[in-house]
Amino acid sequence: MNKTFAVVIIILALALIAYNITMVDFENPLKGDSTIALIGIVASLCAIVLMLIFVTSKKIDKKLKK
């Protein structure tokens, strides 16, 4: 896995967040499909954090090998 793959995953996760925000009913955010949309938002945020950790670890690994 390289940096471009991580960037693609982050962009896809941002697109999923944008889509799921449109699905949330802000009057009742914990009812019906809104709950699933909120779970999707949290899962996408987790994917972004994992990819940022991955990119940072690759940078550290690269510096240690020099």
Image (cartoon, rainbow, N blue to C red):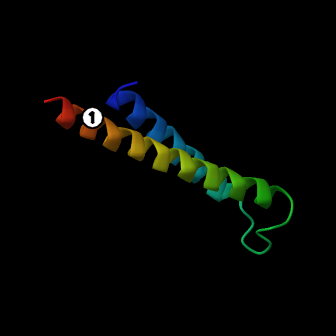
Q: In this view, does 28 lie to the left or right of 46?
A: right
**The residue positioned farthest toward the left in the image shown:** 66
Quadrant position of the N terminus in the picture:
top left
Most distant residue in the bottom direction: 27
Left/right placement of residue 7 relative to residue 18 reads: left
Tell me where residue 39 sits by quadrant: bottom right
Name the one closer to the observer, 17 or 57. 57
Residue at horizontal 35 percent and vertical 29 percent from the top: 4
Q: Which of 9 and 54 is in front in this view?
A: 54
Image location (x, y in percent) of residue 63? 18, 36
Q: What percent of the width, then of the height, locates residue 57?
A: 34, 40
Q: In this view, does 6 lie above or below 47?
A: above
Q: Mark 1 points at which residue?
A: 61
Location of the C terminus (image quadrant): top left
**Residue drawn at (76%, 69%) of the image:** 29
Q: Residue at x 35, y 26 (%)?
A: 2
**Badge 1 density bin: few <14, some 14–19, many ≥20, Cα 10 Å:** few
**What x and y, as percent, mark residue 64?**
20, 35
Q: Is residue 29 above or below residue 35?
A: below
Helix, strand or loop under label 1: helix
User: x, y (%) of residue 20?
Assistant: 65, 52
Disc 1 residue type (three-letter) = Asp
